[in-house]
Amino acid sequence: MSSGRKAQQELEGQILDACTAGVVLWFLYTNPSFFNPWNLKIWEWFLFAVLIRMAIAFYDYLVIFMVDTVFKNKLLPTRTTGKPVRFVELDTKSYIYLGINALHEWVFVQRLCHFIWYSSEISLDPSDISVMNTIGALSVIFIVMDAIYAPCHHILHLPRLYPLIHKHHHRQHFPTRGYLDAGNEHPLEQVVGLSSVWAGLLAAIYGPTGAHGVTLFIFFNIHAALAMLNHSPFDVEFYLVPGLVRYSVANHEMHHRKFTVNYAQYCMWYDHLVQTFAPYEGPKKVT
């Protein structure tokens, strides 16, 4: 890439970031309750934000501990050659993005909990738990979420958009840090991801299955664990939805290595449909 083209992309990225920050600040000024639906005091808002970060860090450690020590999953073949894979340290922009996204996730958690607590469509009564509003609802959430996310992710890889938003996430070709690699993305990209989550949740809540409050808690624990594992070196694979959706960390490693394949996170139906699915390729053998 020429230096002129690179400078133009950097300028376009800075303009996009400035405009995005301006819109967020304007929205915060005109509609502050959106960011604080529970009307928390300032010190309470930031205290809970820190506690949420601590909980996520602990959960990230717990997930890796369970996979490595308890279930004893093997490493992906690319990590067992004896030759270190390409590793990129977190830079200043990465820490800024992680910080912004942490606050965004905290707002998301607040709004979701507020919605669950006050929604007449979501039962919190244990006696209302059924197969449909648990297992059925989980299946709907994961399938609909990726049905929205995968094509949006594909759009972020269009040459005109890729350098401005998604390229930063692909600095790491072989993800290994769990949450730190998963959450190290442009804030606009996180909006796409969380919007896809909302779509999956609403499809289950207002759809034929319904969704119990317990189901939503279970979903977020599974979703967080799988997002962390997708950015880890472990070879984890299992049926997420029995007979329909088979989860594999290897699929997402292929996306980070090849860039233009495997756009879905868990349910690879979109990639099979548009022929962007790529099976896992291990390290090349030297003869």
Image: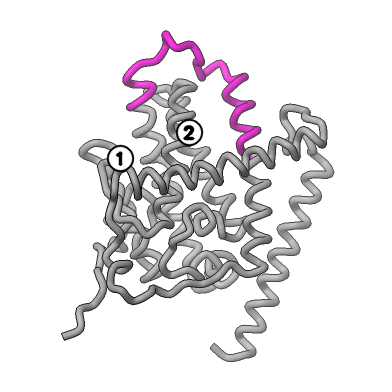
Q: Which residues are magenta?
A: 108-135
Name the residue rendered at 44%, 61% in the picture.
176
Amino acid identity at mark 1: Leu
Q: Secondary structure at mark 2?
A: helix
Within 10 Å of the Cα at label 1, are there few (<14), some (14-19), or many (20+) other Cα atoms? some
* Color style of the picture: one colour
Amino acid identity at mark 2: Leu
- Please tell me whether residue 75 belongs to the stretch shown in magenta: no
**Rendered-image quadrant of the C terminus:** bottom left
Decide which of tag 2 and tag 1 comes sooner along the chain.
Answer: 2
Name the residue rendered at 23%, 77% in the picture.
284
Tell me, for residue 83, which label it has, or none. Answer: none
Residue 170 x, y percent position in the rendering: 49, 68
Q: Are marks 2 and 1 in contact (CB under 8 Å)?
A: no
Instruction: Decide whether the magenta segment is chiefly helix, strand or loop.
Output: helix
Between the residue at mark 2 and the residue at mark 1, the CA separation in whole angstroms equals 17 Å
Name the residue rendered at 65%, 61% in the picture.
95
Residue that label 1 marks:
240
Tell me, for residue 201, which label it has, or none. Answer: 2
Q: In the rendered view, does 265 fall on the left or right side of 51?
A: left
Query: Closest to the observer: 57 or 192?
Result: 57
Q: Secondary structure at mark 1?
A: strand
